[in-house]
Amino acid sequence: MKLSFVLPVLGHEPGLEGTLSHIPINKLSKKFNIEILMIWTPTKDYDDLEEMKNLTKKFNSKLIVEKRRGYGIAHRKGYEAATGDIIVASDSDGTYPLESTDKFLEVFLKEDLDFLSINRFNSLERDSMKTTHFIGNKILTFLVNSLLGLRIKDSQSGMWLIKKSVINDLDLREDTATLATEMKIKPFKKLKSAETDGKYKMRMGENKLGSLRLGISQVMYIFKYFLTRR
């Protein structure tokens, strides 16, 4: 069985090397063939292709350049390129517990899941999330659950596992960070899905997403799905 890691990277991500180093390659390679895909979008502030290539060599990974900016665009690009049976998708800012991938895979395989989302709120490191972000996340999750009849704890998590074979069934359309919401609603509506507890760590570097604008776009997507089911 093959495992693909899909890591979107926007410009220079200070947490990228830490993210890569936390993947438990030695444990996982005993049971899986592994590929690591970094979907990199250069920015005006950072476009050093050679440095990125050197980093991919250091971690025996593959660099995919995606010039179009968009969280959803990067994810779909990675899913298309991935050759693994199972995809592990994660933000590349050092906040997600990739070191626990082997434990998440145990749950995924034991329960024969199509999709597994990682809940951040079980264990938040001190100062890892601003109070405004915490409240915003809780409001968005409440809306998802109350409007769409779901029972999830973290609708905005940036880490999940999914079978490659079911991705086309989701008809993913979101180009921006609203993909995080789309990647909870559609799998929990259409696939055999579950949520398991993880943790959330201090971010390495600054958040590149505008919180208010992102929050509004997430709310709009939730209501759009509620009205159209698409």
Image: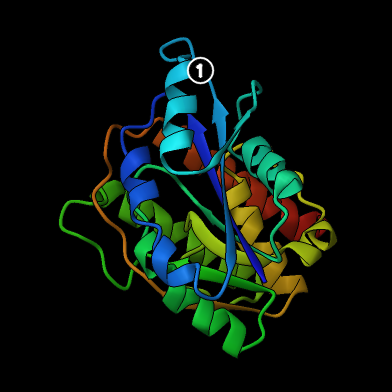
The residue drawn where x is 40% and y is 66% is 26
Query: Does the rendering let one see residue 138?
Result: no
The residue drawn where x is 28% and y is 44% is 203
Is 194 on the left-hand or right-hand side of 186?
Answer: left
The outermost residue toward the bottom is 110
Q: Position of residue 46 (x, y in %)?
A: 42, 15
Depth order, front residue of 54/204: 54
Q: Position of residue 57 (x, y in %)?
A: 47, 35
Amino acid on which the number 1 mark rests in the picture? Leu
The outermost residue toward the top is 44
Is 210 on the left-hand or right-hand side of 86?
Answer: left
Protein image colouring: rainbow
Occupied quadrant, residue 188: bottom right
**Quick one: label 1, few (<14), some, or many (20+) residues within 10 Å?**
few
Depth order, front residue of 183/105: 105
Q: Is residue 144 above or below residue 156?
A: below
Is 48 on the left-hand or right-hand side of 174?
Answer: left
The residue drawn where x is 55% and y is 30% is 40
At mark 1, the secondary structure is helix
Is 124 on the left-hand or right-hand side of 8?
Answer: left
Depth order, front residue of 143/46: 46
Residue located beneath label 1 in the image: 49
Q: Is residue 28 above or below residue 204?
A: below
The residue drawn where x is 39% and y is 25% is 12
Q: Quadrant of the C terminus?
A: bottom right
Q: Position of residue 148 (x, y in %)?
A: 67, 70
The outermost residue toward the left is 126
Depth order, front residue of 111/59: 59
Q: Is residue 69 above or below residue 102?
A: above
Q: Quadrant of the N terminus?
A: bottom right
